[in-house]
Amino acid sequence: MERRVVITGMGIYSCLGKTLDEVRDSLYTGKSGIIFDPVRKEMGFRSALTAKLDEPNLKGVLSRNQRVYMAEECKYAYVATKDALDFAKLDLDYLEKNTVGLLYGNDSSADAVVKSVDTMREKKDTTLVGSGAIFQSMNSTVTMNLGTLFKLRGINMTVSAACASGSHAIGLGSLLIKWGLQDVIVCGGAQEVNPFSIGSFDGISAFSARESEPTKASRPFDRDRDGLVPGGGAATVIIEEYEHAVKRGAPILGEIMGYGFSSNGDHISSPNVDGPANSLKMCLEQSKMNLKDIGYINAHATSTHVGDTNEAKAIYNVFGDVRVPVTSTKGQTGHEMWMAGASEVIYSMLMMKNDFIAANLNFENPDEDSAKLNICGERTSAHFNTFLSNSFGFGGTNSTLIVKNL
Amino acid sequence: MEKQELIDQVNEVLAEEFEVEVSEITPDANIKATLQLDSLSLVDMVALIESTFSVKIQNSELSSIQTFANLYDFISARMSK
């Protein structure tokens, strides 16, 4: 019999809240997490817009020798993961005695790299960089730290796939469980929020320049969108084999029905239509579900012209006249990049569990392509049992997940 | 700098960085045990001394610095050169 993969825990640290309840309320009320950051303007940013997120203070929670290896995004991931493990009723004793894996999306750790290089240049003495720099600087910093702090003994790997990292982490984890190689995996995505991490991104004019109206700047699918707003934090999803979860008495929140993926094999930054459409089709095939089974689509749409247009085309190509409600939560959060695929599964789960679809914030006027979709510009009361979540990234990497309510 | 002033400053920066009470740092106490240093955090102690007192401790010199008294003497000798 095929092994089923279920979600047994969730934790999140985002600009919409630091607990699941806070995030649910923010989704419900349509709160924006976006601000204007004067520091970025002083640094020469074209757009100083960003999600607002405070670093968690882990002094007193973790020892100095544990904290020193943690880059900014690790701190977010630690809090999200601790909450997710608690939710799933997995304590340190269990984690030490059983084989629990770790697959987490992350694709940069710029702040640590910049600071250590600055020290080397100024002091010309590598010792002064300190012991934490190497462990903070590597892309795998999150999995290094989480694996150590939570005593994890299964698969331990960072998934670096640009803005689809978090989604691929969950998808790949689901395959490892389905194939019988793991029973429980901590999955997720983390994204640093410091200016260094996205300065070069700002340099290619990818960000919205609507600085006078920060909360209106991220407007996925809207006709007048002018770019994305960077965000971040971390989101953790505990995935588990169904029978294993039942035997353990774990809370069972939903089932991962399908994982689809594809590569565009095209331009490095401009997405196309066929690649995302292929990811959607593969996910639907894997899930063995019909188009009409999907009750909600959480789009990747980041508020860029070409990205949103091509995703709208891809969704329309696959769903046609099956008018499934579509929103992008990035209107509220900005683009949480390496984290987004994981956080948007949690946002969608919270909506599904609470019978609503959060407004696609700032969707005021459709364009030619978004007009063909059923985009919810206002919060909608809706009972749905299955959602589809898209995540696409630079280099043309695409990931799609379908999750069913349990 | 007077020796006692140096000792107080060494104790203060080490206590702050490694999150121990200043009272735990006594001249005869073992540095690694008191500050809970492993091979990695030992590097941080060396870096801290270098950045605070401009005194570089070479790897080959570390074995002779076991107690805080050894460390005070080492720094004091280098600073007076």
Image (cartoon, grey):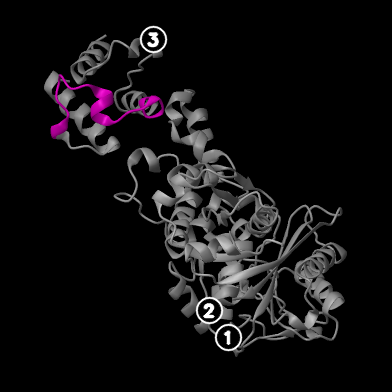
Query: First in sequence: mark 2 or mark 1?
Result: 2
Helix, strand or loop status at disc 1: strand
Chain to which mark 2 belongs: A
Distance between the alpha carbons at the discs numbered 1 and 3:
66 Å
Q: Name the residue under label 1.
A: A356
**In the image, is residue A276 above or below residue A110?**
below
Residue with the mark numbered 3: B60
Quadrant occupied by the C terminus of chain A = bottom right
Residue A355: x and y in percent read 57, 86
Mark 2 neighbour class, 10 Å CA radius: few under 14, some 14 to 19, many 20 or more: many
Inspect the image, locate mark 1, and give the three-letter code of the amino acid beneath it. Answer: Phe
Rendering coords of residue A221 (x, y %): 72, 77
Q: Name the residue under label 2.
A: A27
Name above or below for residue B26 compared with residue A190: above
Image quarter where the N terminus of chain A lies is bottom right
Residues tagged by mark 2 and mark 1 found on one chain of the structure: yes
Q: Which of marks 1 and 3 is in front?
A: 1
Residue A137 relative to residue B64: left or right: right
Q: What residue is shown at x 51% (from left), y 55% (from top)?
A: A42
Name the kind of residue labelled 3 in the image.
Ser
Residue A56: x percent and y percent? 39, 56
Nearer the observer: mark 2 or 1; the answer is 1
Q: Give the range drawn in magenta.
A: B23-42
Q: Residue A190: which quarter of the image?
A: bottom right
Instruction: Name the amino acid type tagged 2.
Output: Leu
Label 1 environment density (alpha carbons within 10 Å; few <14, some 14–19, many ≥20): some
